Image (tube, coloured by chain):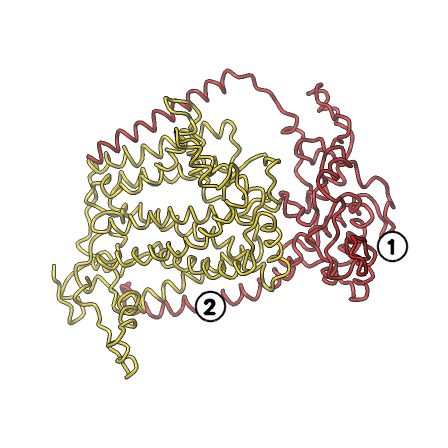
């Protein structure tokens, strides 16, 4: 009884799904194939060798600090970093006094201790990076209706995020001629910018890094656009996962111990089973 | 029930004697997973995965309780408290990555456990109840994992919740009120997040309860084995401890090495980048996908694209649930008296060249965008999936001529089963 019922139900599902298949196949065969420039001209992020990559990677603290400078002087005009606290900067090689000084360079919301009025005061190490805009409406109004996303997690919130940030920032350019030749209708409307590393090729962010020496690095590194974009990518890799290097460095002894324990477990299993294994002669 | 030759627990000191008289817990453990449980001597490494699933359940419960101490189930702050765990809580990142990857590994070992059961027909008499309880555990796991994925309140959390709860909206008449009632609103928000957290905390303990029933039911007939021949005598078995505790210990070591490699070196590989973007009801992600372990069922859901009497969406929902519910009926669909796929030539062909590739194809299509050719491929695979369990399996079991089975487990291990060669003291009973 169950088998007859099952047979009917199974055939039922099969018939229905095959109707879907035939319908889909008919549409697929008869529909005009419309190509999409987003598929053909979108580029995957270029691979950069960051020092923190790979199972033995460590932070290039000088690079991460340079990236902080790029963030502060360029990105922070529009993008917040709300999940990062100033005290976290101690983990990228700043001393306690330097962290206090860096925090004080930022204005964060506070209250006047005498009147209780809302004021802006210099940041303390315990503060998080401040919001740039009071709310989303203000953010959209100031940026041609596109809200600049928070950057704390950007390196994890995109596929291959660290490379993506670098490629995107250094990837602005004119629309390639092959694209215009193939899709004459393709256009980058006013307020948008062509960038082949952005999924739909038109991004609302104006090119942020435009000229060499836009940032004057304190360590004297020549500030080319790719240099700045790599540095800020490294910094955002750190903000997205401050424990990245600690995590990998914790992993090795644990894997070593597990390997040792597993070998022991295997040997003891072999010894216990030796008596009951069939003898091969 | 146990086998007459099962070793009996003997308390060795005064305290254990006292315990054994008042509360025989040591005896219970001894009979469940100790030397008092005789197990077939020929189990392969595929039989490790039940114990491994139990390990991952416990890992999820322990890491989950720690995470719950630092997490706040409120739509305003859920994403921020998740980041608080990652950044400010001591070893919080280890707890969260262990929990997130632990869910994936729980599903990996359970899938291997289920497909081992399918290949060796572990669902057949006398083990139907173990199988049925196992399917219940799997359904509970799916519900728990789905709700857990919502808790970080990222983009995939939110939109996954919206799509999955939206399935209830496909039910005629009562669908929409039901969906609103389940969510506590018209879209996932604070009410939904709160109840998902509550249920996500509760369900693992329900799973634990059903797991205990699952193991209890297992101890009635005893474990199955790769030949599918039932235990006949003492020489067919070995005590669980130390033989299988040692073997499981080794298996646990191997899976932990793989698991920890993910946790420490590629902890986000099995997740989706979009879930590091805070939930935003106004921005729909380009491709909404569930966690990877739901891909095959998601592919079945999306395979129905044609309104055939009922709406395509409703067909998809029915088929998705049916694709798992069909497992409940396997003990009665597959009538072949032979259990093990090793002795069933036709069954084996359809298993390795039909079912397994179908699952792989459904997995790939489930993770792919809902575009051609993925949809058409998933439709063919969906058709085969239902044909396999509901049509092919019953027919095979009627027409197949199984290969000869070994006389006993002892014979399959030693190549011969001659009582003269048996160690002294074990009399053949069959």
Residue pointed to by mark 1: A220
Q: Which chain is red?
A: A
Q: Nearer the viewer, residue A148 or A182?
A: A148
Measured along the vertical axis of the image, is residue A30 above or below residue A216?
A: above
Percent coordinates x, y for residue B111 in the rendering: 39, 48
Image side of residue B134 versus residue B158, left or right: left
Residue A266 is labelled as none
Give residue B411's position: percent from left, percent from top: 20, 57
Could you tell me which quadrant the C terminus of chain B lies in?
Answer: bottom left
What residue is at 45 percent from the left and 59 percent from the top?
B61
Q: Secondary structure at mark 1?
A: loop
**Mark 2 or mark 1, whichever is nearer to me:** 1
Task: Residue A46 in the image: state x and y as whole percent.
Answer: 69, 41
**Label 1 chain ID:** A
Looking at the image, which is closer to me, B282 or B29?
B282
Q: Earlier in the sequence, mark 2 or mark 1?
A: 1
On the image, the x and y values in percent for residue A57 come to 66, 57
Q: Which residue is mark 2?
A: A261
Q: Residues within 10 Å of mark 1 (few under 14, many from 20)?
A: few
Chain B: drawing colour: yellow
Q: Residues within 10 Å of mark 2 (few under 14, many from 20)?
A: some
Give the image quarter of residue B336.
Answer: top left
Residue B48 relative to residue B96: left or right = left
Vertical order, A14 against B239 (above or below)? above
**Up-down relation of residue B212 to residue B350 (above or below):** below
What secondary structure is found at the residue carrying circle 2? helix
Which residue is the extreme one toward the front?
Answer: A115
Query: Which quadrant does the N terminus of chain B fall into?
Result: bottom left
């Amino acid at each position: 009884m169950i088998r007859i019922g099952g047979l009917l139900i199974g055939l039922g599902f099969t018939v229905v799904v095959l109707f879907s298949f035939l319908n889909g196949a008919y549409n697929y065969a008869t529909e005009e194939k419309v190509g999409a420039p987003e598929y053909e001209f979108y580029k995957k992020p270029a691979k950069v060798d960051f020092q923190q990559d790979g199972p033995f990677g460590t932070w290039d603290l000088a690079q991460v600090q340079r990236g902080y400078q790029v963030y502060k002087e360029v990105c922070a005009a529009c993008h917040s970093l709300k999940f990062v606290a100033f005290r976290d900067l101690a983990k990228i090689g700043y001393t306690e006094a330097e962290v206090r000084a860096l925090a004080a360079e930022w204005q964060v919301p506070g209250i006047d201790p005498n009147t209780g009025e809302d004021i802006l005061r210099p940041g303390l190490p315990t503060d998080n990076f401040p919001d740039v805009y009071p709310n989303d409406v203000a953010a959209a109004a100031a940026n041609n209706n596109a809200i600049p996303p928070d950057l704390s997690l950007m390196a994890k919130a995109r596929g291959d995020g660290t490379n993506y940030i670098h490629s995107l920032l250094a990837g602005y350019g004119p629309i390639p001629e092959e694209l215009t030749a193939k899709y004459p209708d393709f256009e980058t409307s006013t307020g948008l910018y062509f960038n082949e590393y952005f999924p739909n090729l038109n991004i609302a962010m104006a090119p942020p890094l435009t000229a060499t020496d836009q940032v004057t690095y304190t360590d004297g590194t020549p500030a080319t656009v790719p240099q700045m974009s790599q540095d800020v990518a490294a910094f955002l890799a750190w903000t997205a996962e401050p424990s990245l290097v600690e995590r990998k460095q914790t992993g090795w002894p644990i894997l070593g111990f597990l390997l040792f324990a597993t070998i022991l477990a295997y040997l003891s299993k072999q010894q216990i089973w030796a008596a009951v294994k069939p003898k091969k002669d | 029930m146990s086998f007459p030759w099962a070793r009996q627990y003997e308390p060795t000191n005064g305290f254990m004697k006292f315990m054994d008289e008042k509360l025989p817990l040591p005896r219970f453990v001894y009979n469940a997973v100790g030397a008092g449980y005789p197990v077939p001597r020929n189990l392969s490494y595929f039989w490790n995965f039940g114990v491994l699933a139990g390990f991952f359940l416990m890992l999820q419960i322990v890491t989950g309780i720690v995470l719950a101490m630092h997490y706040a189930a409120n739509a305003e702050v859920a994403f921020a408290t998740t980041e608080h765990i990652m950044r400010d809580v001591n070893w919080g990142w280890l707890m969260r990555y262990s929990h997130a990857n632990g869910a994936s590994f729980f599903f990996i070992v359970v899938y291997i456990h289920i497909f081992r059961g399918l290949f060796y027909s572990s669902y057949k008499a006398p083990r139907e109840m173990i199988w049925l309880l196992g399917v219940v555990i799997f359904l509970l796991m799916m519900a728990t994992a789905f709700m857990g994925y919502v808790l970080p309140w990222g983009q995939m959390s939110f939109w996954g919740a919206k799509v999955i709860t939206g399935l209830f909206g496909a039910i005629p008449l009562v669908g929409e009120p039901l969906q609103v009632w389940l969510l506590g609103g018209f879209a996932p928000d604070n009410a939904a997040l709160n109840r998902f957290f509550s249920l996500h905390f509760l369900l693992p303990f329900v799973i634990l309860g059903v797991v205990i029933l699952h193991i209890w039911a297992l101890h009635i007939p005893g474990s199955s084995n790769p030949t599918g021949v039932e235990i006949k005598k003492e020489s067919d078995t070995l005590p669980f401890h130390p033989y299988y505790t040692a073997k499981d210990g080794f298996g646990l070591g191997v899976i932990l090495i793989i698991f920890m490699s993910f946790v420490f070196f590629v902890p986000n590989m099995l997740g989706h980048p979009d879930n590091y973007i805070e939930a935003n009801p106004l921005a729909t992600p380009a491709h909404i996908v569930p966690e990877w372990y739901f891909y095959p069922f998601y592919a079945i859901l999306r395979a129905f694209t044609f309104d055939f009497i009922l709406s395509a969406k409703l067909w998809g929902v029915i088929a998705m649930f049916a694709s798992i519910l069909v497992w409940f009926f396997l003990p009665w669909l597959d009538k072949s008296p032979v259990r093990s796929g090793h002795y069933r030539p036709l069954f084996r062909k359809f298993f390795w060249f039909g079912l397994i590739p179908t699952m792989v194809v459904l997995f790939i299509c489930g993770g792919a965008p809902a575009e051609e050719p993925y949809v058409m491929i998933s439709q063919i695979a969906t058709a085969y999936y239902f044909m396999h369990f509901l049509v092919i399996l019953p027919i095979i079991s009627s027409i197949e001529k199984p290969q000869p089975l070994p006389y006993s487990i002892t014979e399959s291990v030693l190549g011969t089963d001659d009582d003269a060669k048996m160690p002294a003291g074990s009399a053949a009973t069959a």
